[in-house]
Amino acid sequence: MADFIETKGFRVWPGLIDRAGQEVLVDRLRAALSVAPLVQPVTPRGKPMSVRMSACGDYGWVTDRRGYRYEPQHPSGVDWPPIPEEVLAIWRTVTDCARLPECCLINWYGEGARMGLHQDKDEGDFGCPVVSVSLGDDGLFRMGNLERGGKTESVWLKSGDVVVMGGGARLAHHGVDRIRFGSSTLLRDGGRINLTLRVVTEGP
């Protein structure tokens, strides 16, 4: 396994997933999205987000006028498809967590899409890490602090890179400032897919 680079407690595994593995993941995601299509969510204030979202697993993270939360079903009412085994294998490779992720959030970034600095704090077990998988176009990932503000660090994530946010970085602010649209040939129409794996419920 490739070595990771640690910055501000974030562990980045450059190129952990090779091209063949990335193509398999995209095939699995296309199958999942045929069941639970991407939607453009809105914030509780009604502002449309620039990314489109779906999920796999027991839960999906959603946002709408009712707030941020996890739901057991897609907004259309269908159950979320299961997390592909190839995705679970990444979790097992980069974490020593005894629990498996219950949500694999799928974010699709088109040209001009971004994700503001935020914390992943809607989960019931902060002892489990968050794992992020990048597929497709390069994304400028910003790593912040537990409190909003202060000095941040940024790194360009490429297709096949994996980031683990655990320990002191579990509740750190992070976001995606922009993507280099068209920088990868993995997705036929361009864009970036980010998979975010999280344990949702409280531990036993």
Image (tube, helix red, strand yellow):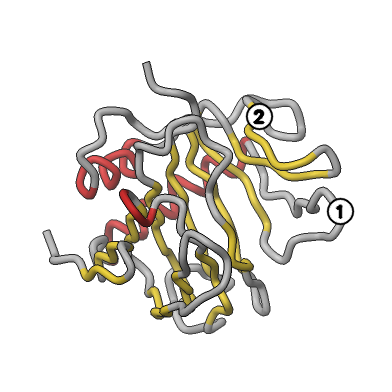
Please give the residue where the numbered disc 2 appears in the rendered image.
71
Query: From what the image shows, is residue 120 above or below residue 142?
Result: above
In which quarter of the view is residue 186 placed?
A: bottom left
The quarter of the picture where the C terminus appears is top left
Query: Between residues 83 and 101, which one lies in front from this camera angle?
Result: 101
Say which element carries label 2: strand
Q: Earlier in the sequence, mark 1 or mark 2?
A: 1
Kindly tell me whether residue 137 is visible in this rendering: no
Please give the residue where the numbered disc 1 appears in the rendered image.
45
Residue drawn 37% across the image and 56% down it: 169
Numbered disc total: 2
The quarter of the picture where the N terminus appears is bottom left
In which quarter of the view is residue 176 placed?
A: bottom right
Q: In this view, does 65 lie to the left or right of 22?
A: right
Residue drawn 65% across the image and 29% down it: 71
Query: Between residues 168 and 13, which one lies in front from this camera angle?
Result: 168
Q: Name the spot of residue 30 as percent of width and height, x first.
A: 53, 49
Q: Name the spot of residue 3 as percent of width and height, x first.
A: 13, 66
Q: Is residue 200 left or right of residue 84?
A: right
Amino acid residing under circle 1 = Arg
